[in-house]
């Protein structure tokens, strides 16, 4: 099979969230199973020079979007055997940052249209175009609207993956014809609740809609999780699937990770992990104490990550004697709250506001437990990275957290879980974790078992391949 994987971010080139991890590792896993899979993404000016230096210019062409005709340069890169196409237009992508501009709708309409135009200039004829999130949601829409009569395009199937249903690409109706180039007669494809909604268009127009865990695929049929798209999804369940993400187990490997203080594996975790813990405590200004349970959090500081629960009960948790290391940035409410806690309890709460990948790794390696009380979590990668580093996850049972973490109170456990979105239930799970922490023998066994969990792409890549095959029958 031949698959073109379209995403607005992909590692190692650029990342703002979990999508980049997936786009940077799933295509390789599919290739490892002997299918052709290439990636296409924008050439942002924020991509580091070292990575740019290896790109090869292929050609350039013009992309029609509404009345505009915009230049597009096509570059090619190769990472671990996976071919990446990077689409260049300085007007749209030469900026500090990758999203959050007044003209994002226009920028990603251009990108989506450019992906389709690019097919005329490359020696690769995809049978499937796999799109991700609202930034590439117009690919299936434009394909059906403008390209189907062309022989090269008539049989291409499209898959659309929702990584987070909250971000739908919603804009004013006035964009439809002038900016997006959607003819008035077809406006209903993108219109939703009096707005233009990119994700709605893709849900309607693609051959398959997937999301990043089986539980989230069920949850988004419910108004509590769907951010109003349940009305679109319920009648289209026949083409909705949930496939759990994996992680790149080579990139996230405590044995080889150059960003952590000291490398370790299953055989050396017992001595290697405490060294990481003490070094992390030191770096974060906490008392170096191997007997205090150290709870890590690496998260965007936004409400759906469950931070209101943490906020509600943090003082009590501090009173129980736990230490916290928190890394993240986001809403002012939470940044200010955690800064206040850090000042009030400097020997219990370590804090860094920001997106610092090196420190994130040190937290995965150095913390005893990792807290993820998300209100909703499409998949979540941090709980899997924690397992890999022998850090026991404490999670709320939702989305991918429910599909990857089982409570140590039962059979085959690898973490601690709670169900209701309730602060005391969360603390109950943290306290149970602390109780196990006191029993060093059992704790060490649980750590080793966590490290043995298979979080690789191997199984999920097969599920994607089966799904692609079902479309080509
Ligand atoms: C989004 C989701 C997260 C998921 C990631 C990759 O960031 O919020 O849960 O793990 O996408 O699919």
Image: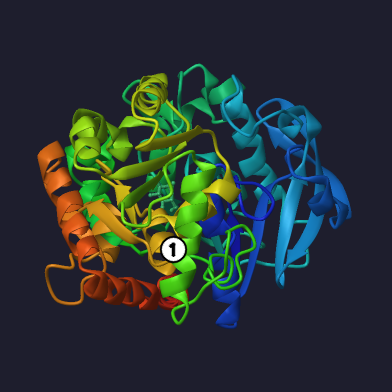
Q: Position of residue 193 (x, y in %)?
A: 31, 24
Which colour assignment does the render follow? Answer: rainbow
Q: Work out whether residue 258 or residue 213 is closer to the camera in this orientation and state it.
A: 258
Residue, disc 1: 274
Q: Is residue 271 left or right of residue 379?
A: right
Visible residue check, residue 388: yes
- Above or below residue 37? Residue 51 is above
Q: Quadrant of the N terminus?
A: bottom right
Q: Which quarter of the picture shows residue 98? A: top right
Q: Is residue 118 left or right of residue 32?
A: right
Q: Going 56% across and 26% down the picture, which residue do you hit?
A: 100
Q: Going 31% across and 49% down the picture, which residue do you hit?
A: 371
Q: Position of residue 386 (x, y in %)?
A: 40, 60
Q: Residues within 10 Å of mark 1 (few under 14, many from 20)?
A: some
Q: Work out whether residue 415 or residue 17 is closer to the camera in this orientation and state it.
A: 415
Q: Quadrant of the C terminus?
A: bottom left
Q: Position of residue 159 (x, y in %)?
A: 46, 58
Q: Going 41% across and 39% down the picture, which residue do you hit?
A: 326
Q: Going 26% across and 39% down the picture, which residue do you hit?
A: 226
Q: Is residue 429 left or right of residue 5?
A: left
Visible residue check, residue 159: no
């Amino acid at each position: 099979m031949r698959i073109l994987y379209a995403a607005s971010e992909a590692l190692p080139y650029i990342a703002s969230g979990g999508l980049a991890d997936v786009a940077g590792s799933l295509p390789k896993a599919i290739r490892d199973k002997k299918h052709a899979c290439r990636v296409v993404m924008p050439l942002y000016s924020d991509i580091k020079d070292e990575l740019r230096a290896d790109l090869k210019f292929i050609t350039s062409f013009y992309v029609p979007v509404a009345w505009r005709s915009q230049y597009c340069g096509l570059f090619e890169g190769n990472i671990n055997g996976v071919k990446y196409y990077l689409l260049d237009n300085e007007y749209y992508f030469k900026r500090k940052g990758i999203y959050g501009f007044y003209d994002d709708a226009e920028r990603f309409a251009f990108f989506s249209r450019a992906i389709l135009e690019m097919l005329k200039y490359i020696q690769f004829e995809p049978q499937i175009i796999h799109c991700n999130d609202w930034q590439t949601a117009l690919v299936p829409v434009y394909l059906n609207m403008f390209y189907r009569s062309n022989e090269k395009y008539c049989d291409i199937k499209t898959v659309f993956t929702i990584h987070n249903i909250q971000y739908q690409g919603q804009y004013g109706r006035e964009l439809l014809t002038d900016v997006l180039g959607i003819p008035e007669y077809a406006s209903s494809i993108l219109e939703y609740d009096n707005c233009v909604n990119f994700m709605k268009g893709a849900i309607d127009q693609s051959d398959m809609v997937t999301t990043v865990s089986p539980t989230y695929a069920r949850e988004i049929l419910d108004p509590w999780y769907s951010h109003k798209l349940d009305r679109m999804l319920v009648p289209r369940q026949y083409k909705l699937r949930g496939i759990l993400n994996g992680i790149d187990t080579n990139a996230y490997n405590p044995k080889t990770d150059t960003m952590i203080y000291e490398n370790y594996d299953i055989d050396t975790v017992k001595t290697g992990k405490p060294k990481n813990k003490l070094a992390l405590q030191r770096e974060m200004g906490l008392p170096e104490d191997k007997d205090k349970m150290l709870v890590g959090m690496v998260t965007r500081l936004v409400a759906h990550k469950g931070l209101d629960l943490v906020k509600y009960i943090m003082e009590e948790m501090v009173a129980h004697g736990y230490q916290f290391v928190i890394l993240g940035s986001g809403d002012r409410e939470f940044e200010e709250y955690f800064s206040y806690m850090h000042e009030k309890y400097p020997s219990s709460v370590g804090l860094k506001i920001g997106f610092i990948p090196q420190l994130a790794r040190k937290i995965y390696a150095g913390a005893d437990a990792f807290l993820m009380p998300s209100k909703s979590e499409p998949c979540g990668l941090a709980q899997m990275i924690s397992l890999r580093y022998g850090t026991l996850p404490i999670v709320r049972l939702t989305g991918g957290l429910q599909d990857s973490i089982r409570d140590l109170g039962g059979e085959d456990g690898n973490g601690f879980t709670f169900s209701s979105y309730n602060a005391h239930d969360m603390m109950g799970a943290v306290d149970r974790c602390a109780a196990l922490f006191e029993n060093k023998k059992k704790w060490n066994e649980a750590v080793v078992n966590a490290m043995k969990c298979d979080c690789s792409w191997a199984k999920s890549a097969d599920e994607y391949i089966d799904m692609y095959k079902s479309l080509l029958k």
